[in-house]
Image (spheres, helix red, strand yellow):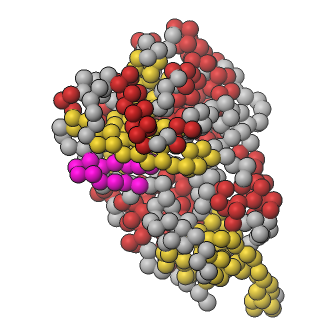
């Protein structure tokens, strides 16, 4: 008997779940019918690529991490291996704005952890006392408590205040739009917690990892991918390719879900006779009603909370405890010959102590090929997040003038841009605050009372593209295990 599955949400999490369901069901000879509902008129969620002449502009995320392999593996299964694009690593530098000047992040600093002594000693970003404090990390005892810490507490304890202010805090603001004072290090950077536990030191752990990579390289296993990866024709190529490869999934756009209801149906069981199993009724804004054996909700947690209010208010309350913040990206193009800054890197990050109105910028045409004509440069600036969310809601004219002023002050760019594009993402960035992991444990326990209902997406166990794909795959396995138990 064919099982009916409804997936709510057409972002990368919902799409990855649908594709994984089809893959696994086909491999295991199981029959499923999948309906994917998306309230907007296009799929892909926050992944949005726009072409303007010879410029390729990413409105949302622009890459994924190769060390989290699930995005690359999915691309290869989809036949997109030739579309994978590495960074231009001759420009593999990042800059930090400090005291109004751009300082190169020392070579060998990996996600705030130093692994080489001489580049750190030569750096003019970190003070002498700050360098000594970072080096002392080798001798700091590991945390004996299992309690969750904020990223600020964790970094200060292990590496010192300067490492937090000048490296870790601008990193998490630029990438995750989060406040390091409230961010859960267990949930957002579990690898650091594991590294401290295993090696007793982040520096020792990172050095050990680099040695492993060098040994692999010495055996002729040259890394195929760079740290940051994207797709030649933009990240929107990924959801579009997933859609083309879906065979038994019906995708319905412009279908906003109003609520989900649970009801029981009697089903024959070879061992137990007639048993009552939950089914789900999904009511849409246009009046349609769908029945499903299983429902997967792949929407932001606050939207999911609203949908589940009629089923269990305590689940909705837990979901509403996951805060979100708003961000915007502003892309500007300029003629290269008129830019005095060499732009010898991937871009820069801005600590909040600088009191600027952008959190960072990517020099897109340096970081990736095929993003702009050879005679032009493309720069993408980041606005908003936990400290400056109100700036996201400036009108277009004021936002462009603000960003132009920031680039003038930081990079010396006084030219008028060839083009500008603004993309606002209201309540798009989940914040993994202290205790996030514990709240998820309670949520999972409560959800176990509602067999056949599953939640996936960036709100829970990682908000990057690769992590969302992984969670979608795990969700697909759980769905099939439930339906064909």
Task: Give the image location of residue 406, x and y in percent.
Answer: 41, 27
Residue 391 in the figure: left or right of residue 295: left
Which residue corresponds to the image point at 38% horizontal and 22% vertical from the top-left? 409
Name the foreground residue: 271 vs 6.
6
Quadrant in which the N terminus appears: bottom right
Which residue corresponds to the image point at 70% horizontal and 73% vertical from the top-left? 260
Task: Give the image location of residue 124, x and y in percent.
Answer: 43, 12
Residue 147 in the figure: left or right of residue 299: right
Vertical placement of 223 versus 129: above or below?
below
Which residue corresponds to the image point at 46% horizontal and 61% vertical from the top-left? 44
The answer to whether residue 416 of the structure is visible from this angle is: yes
Vertical placement of 349 versus 225: above or below?
above
Which residue corresponds to the image point at 67% horizontal and 38% vertical from the top-left? 184
Residue 42 in the figure: left or right of residue 5: left
Task: Give the image location of residue 217, x and y in percent.
Answer: 36, 38
**Residue 58 lies in magenta, yes or no?**
yes
**Residue 390 lies in magenta, yes or no?**
no
Name the foreground residue: 62 vs 466.
62
Quadrant housing residue 344: top left
The answer to whether residue 217 of the structure is visible from this angle is: no
Q: How many marks?
A: 0
Q: Which residues are magenta?
A: 48-62
Quadrant in which the C terminus appears: bottom right
Name the foreground residue: 69 vs 312.
312
């Amino acid at each position: 008997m064919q099982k009916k599955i409804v997936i709510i949400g057409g972002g990368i999490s919902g799409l990855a779940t649908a594709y994984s369901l089809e893959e696994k069901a086909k491999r295991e000879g199981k029959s499923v019918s999948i309906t994917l509902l998306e309230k907007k008129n296009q799929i892909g969620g926050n992944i949005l690529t726009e072409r303007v002449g010879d410029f390729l502009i990413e409105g949302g995320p622009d890459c994924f991490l190769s060390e989290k392999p699930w995005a690359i593996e999915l691309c290869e299964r989809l036949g997109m291996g030739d579309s994978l694009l590495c960074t231009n690593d001759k420009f593999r530098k990042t800059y930090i704005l400090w005291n109004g000047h751009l300082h190169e992040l020392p070579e060998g600093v990996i996600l705030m952890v130093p692994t080489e002594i001489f580049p750190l000693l030569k750096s003019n970003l970190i003070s002498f006392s700050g360098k000594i404090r970072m080096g002392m990390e080798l001798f700091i005892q590991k945390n004996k408590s299992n309690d969750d810490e904020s990223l600020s507490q964790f970094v200060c304890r292990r590496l010192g205040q300067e490492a937090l202010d000048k490296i870790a805090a601008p990193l998490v603001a630029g990438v995750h739009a989060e406040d390091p004072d409230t961010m859960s290090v267990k949930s957002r950077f579990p690898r650091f917690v594991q590294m401290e536990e295993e090696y007793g030191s982040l520096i020792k752990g990172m050095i050990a990892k680099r040695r492993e990579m060098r040994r692999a390289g010495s055996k002729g296993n040259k890394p195929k991918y760079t740290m940051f990866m994207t797709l030649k024709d933009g990240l929107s190529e990924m959801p579009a390719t997933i859609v083309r490869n879906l065979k038994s999934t019906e995708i319905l756009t412009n279908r906003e879900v109003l609520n989900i209801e649970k009801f029981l149906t009697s089903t024959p069981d070879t061992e137990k006779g007639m048993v009552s199993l939950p089914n789900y009724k999904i009511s849409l804004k246009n009046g349609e009603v769908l029945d499903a054996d299983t429902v997967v909700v792949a929407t932001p947690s606050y939207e999911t909370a609203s949908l589940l209010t009629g089923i269990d208010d305590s689940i909705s309350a837990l979901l509403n405890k996951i805060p979100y913040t708003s961000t915007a990206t502003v892309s500007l193009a300029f003629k290269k010959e008129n830019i005095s800054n060499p732009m010898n890197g991937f871009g820069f990050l801005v600590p909040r102590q600088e009191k600027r109105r952008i959190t960072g910028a990517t020099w897109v045409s340096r970081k990736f090929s095929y993003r702009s004509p050879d005679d032009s440069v493309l720069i993408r600036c980041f606005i908003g997040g936990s400290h400056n969310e109100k700036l996201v809601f400036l009108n277009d004219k004021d936002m462009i003038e603000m960003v132009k002023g920031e680039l003038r002050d930081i990079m010396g760019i006084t030219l008028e841009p060839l083009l500008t594009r603004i993309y606002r993402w209201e309540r798009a960035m989940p914040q993994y605050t202290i205790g996030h992991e514990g709240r998820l444990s309670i949520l999972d326990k409560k959800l176990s009372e509602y067999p056949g209902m599953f939640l996936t997406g960036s709100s829970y166990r990682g908000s990057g593209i690769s992590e969302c794909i992984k969670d979608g795959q795990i969700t697909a396995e759980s769905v099939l295990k439930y339906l064909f138990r």
